Image (cartoon, rainbow, N blue to C red):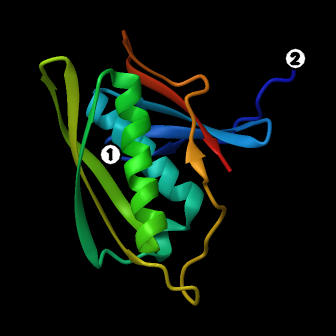
């Protein structure tokens, strides 16, 4: 079986991520000391796969709230929310973060934000189109070294 080709890890203050190839798709491995840090790293990884974040200005801040029944679903739903906003608003993110995760009844709720601006074809270098966040090999778990997650993106 062919092993996925991994790219170097990218780090932020919150956590870090690594992009890996997966058949016709791409994947993200995310790491963080907390679940919030791991989700933040996932959002930054997604934003970096879509565009060169260094060329994006922090013009507008957007708030997000996502509710899911399990941590791994929260990871997927957080990324789906960012991707939906990117697609429907023609928006690219410079930065994003998850500030809080609450356990409410049988659900988990993440509160987060993103900053960026509408796509400007003259300034923004778009890398690739991410079509969707898949359920394939989706995980987000807490271990001795912190939180680790894996998500496959349809490109």
Q: Nearer the viewer, residue 71 or 59?
A: 71
SS assignment at label 2: loop
Mark in the foreground, 2 or 1: 2
Measured in 3D between alpha carbons, the distance from the residue under mark 2 to the one under mark 1, in whole angstroms, is: 35 Å
Residue extending farthest top: 144
Which residue corresponds to the image point at 36% horizontal and 42% vertical from the top-left?
Answer: 78
| Residue linked to disc 1 | 13
Q: Position of residue 132 (x, y in %)?
A: 57, 47
Above or below, 123 against 40 in this view is below
Q: Tell me the crowding category of disc 2: few under 14, some 14 to 19, or many 20 or more residues within 10 angstroms, Cα based.
A: few
| Residue linked to disc 2 | 1
Q: Position of residue 4 (x, y in %)?
A: 76, 29
Q: Nearer the viewer, residue 5 or 106?
A: 106
Whether residue 51 is visible to the viewer of this picture, yes or no, is yes
Report the number of numbered marks. 2
Q: Is residue 126 left or right of residue 104?
A: right
Q: Position of residue 102 (x, y in %)?
A: 14, 28
Q: Is residue 86 left or right of residue 8?
A: left
Q: Is residue 38 left or right of residue 5?
A: left
Q: Quadrant of residue 11?
A: top left
Which residue corresponds to the image point at 50% horizontal and 85% vertical from the top-left?
Answer: 120
Q: Position of residue 3 (x, y in %)?
A: 80, 24
Residue 2: which numbered mark, if any?
none
């Amino acid at each position: 079986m062919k092993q996925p080709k991994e790219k170097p890890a990218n780090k932020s203050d919150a956590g870090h991520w690594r992009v890996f190839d997966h058949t016709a798709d791409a994947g993200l491995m995310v790491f963080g000391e907390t679940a919030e840090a791991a989700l933040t790293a996932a959002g930054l990884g997604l934003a970096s796969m879509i565009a060169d974040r260094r060329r994006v200005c922090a013009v507008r801040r957007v708030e997000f709230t996502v509710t899911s029944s399990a941590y791994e679903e929260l990871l997927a739903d957080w990324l789906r929310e960012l991707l939906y906003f990117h697609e429907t608003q023609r928006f690219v993110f410079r930065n994003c973060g998850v500030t809080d995760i609450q356990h409410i009844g049988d659900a988990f709720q993440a509160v987060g934000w993103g900053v960026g601006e509408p796509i400007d074809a003259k300034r923004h270098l778009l890398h690739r189109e991410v079509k969707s966040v898949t359920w394939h090999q989706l995980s987000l778990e807490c271990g001795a070294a912190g939180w680790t997650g894996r998500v496959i993106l349809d490109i």
